[in-house]
Amino acid sequence: MSEQSLAAILQKTSPVKLLRNSSIGPYVYPVVQSEYTSWRDEQWAWQHACVLFNQSYHMSDMYVEGPDALKLLSALGINTFKNFGPNKAKQYVVCSPEGYVIGDVILFGLEENVFNLVGRPSVHNWVQYNCETGGYNAKCRRDERAAAQKGPIVRQAYRYQVQGPNALKLMEKVLGGPVPEVKFFQMTTFTIAGKTVRVLRHGMVGQPGFELFGPWGDGEAVKSVIVEAGKEFGLRLVGGRAYSSNTLESGWIPSPLPAIYTSPKMKAYREWLPATAYEGVCSLGGSFYSDNIEDYYLTPYDLGYGASVKFDHEFVGREALEKISKSPKRTKVTLALNEDDVLKAMRTMFQKGDRAKYIDFPSAVYATWPYDQVMKNGKTIGISTWVGYSSNEGKMLTLAILDNEHAANGNDVTFVWGEQPGTGSKPTVEPHVQMEIRAQVAPVPYAEVARTAYRPK
């Protein structure tokens, strides 16, 4: 066993202590400006005009190729792979042998036996480990996110998203004619600025849109044409500050803790993972606290991925998920926080002592894996995993997972803000007192347009 492995570190401390005391803050969105206009304006534009998300820097890419590439991905993913191949994409979810989520990414089928994983690196690490140790005739090639690079940032591909009610009109102007019909989460190619651009039919925050990617050197030319054409349609560039808040309206939970720290069947994986890997250095924070790291694990059903679980193939975690699927115990919801209680917490910033944990706008997340406690009548009934403010909705919202009996719309619950004393030491956590904030259970997605107006075909 390498002394630099995650397993070696975990022999000296518990997973909870390791992650609660990490000096790493929230997941970063580097290189792009913090704000291009204002984060309020940028939020407004994704519901009322159109936006360009520059996703070229903050996500890890990994290319999996070879005769056994699809076999490898199918053996790990809960998703079906029937009819999956070139020019198709899907949200790809992988689980531990016990049925808990390791992570999710977008999986692109680029060519026959060539695939691209895009997202946070916990999925990439698990796939790469299995590729290298499982006897597959395939190979993995990493293209690390900017935060993991040293020196000048050069990536294999740029990646943009054009989203919003005016996105289709914008792309028609860019192309000089009708946009080719492409089904949701399928791909085609466009020619922009004389460059061949691969395009995924996509949608975020309930609005139709496109994800565009291509060789790194083409990125600026392609973006310039889109930005110029977008002036007519109210296009806004979205900065790093607003970017992570769009999930509050769309309902996607970006940060499940990877369930890799305790499974006996994953011991060799923990020995393979370096201590400096994502899973070893990122931070766990929030008012929900347990000494048992397994209390932070989530199932696909907790995260709203139940429809993605397909028992039409063998995959890691299938047996456990077949049992869990019969009676999932929790439901994903949105919590709308009580304005008076939020203001009460913020008002403590104007006193010298007994302050609440600082609430940042628009995203109040201060750890890589945020886990806040949700209560009812003094009893823990669930956890919140993302919190922030939507200017579009005029609400402080959280994405939460509640016990089924408390998950009905309109139910009143209590959201606990701030960490328990003595449960960790992080640079992002100043001395503070916990605050109880009333909240009401609401639909997920929260934005009405995300629930009703846009139905992908």
Image (spheres, rainbow, N blue to C red):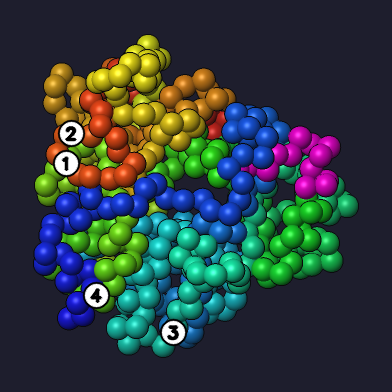
Q: CA distance from mark 1 to mark 3?
A: 43 Å
Name the residue tied to disc 4. Answer: 4
Q: Which mark is residue 138?
A: 3
Q: Residue 311 appears at what percent x and percent y?
A: 32, 61
Q: Is residue 238 magenta?
A: yes
Helix, strand or loop under label 3:
loop
User: Does dot 2 land on a helix, a strand or a loop?
Assistant: loop
Q: Are marks 1 and 3 in contact (CB under 8 Å)?
A: no
152 left or right of 278? right
398, above or below 76, in the image: above
Mark 3 or 4: the one toward you: 4
Badge number at residue 423:
1
Residue 300 placement, left or right of 289: right
Query: Which label's residue is closer to the chain start, 4 or 1?
Result: 4
Question: Disc 2 designates what residue?
Answer: 420
Labels 4 & 2 near each other (Cβ < 8 A) = no
Q: Is residue 107 left or right of residue 383?
A: right
| Residue at point 23%, 45% (across, down) | 425
How many marks overall?
Answer: 4
Alpha carbons under labels 4 and 2: distance apart: 31 Å
**Callout in the foreground (1, 3):** 1
Query: What is the secondary structure assignment of the residue under circle 4?
Result: loop
Whether tag 3 and tag 4 are in contact, CB under 8 A, the answer is: no
Sequence-earlier tag: 3 or 4? 4
Question: What crowding class fits label 3: few (fewer than 14 Cα within 10 Å), some (14-19), or many (20 or more)?
Answer: some
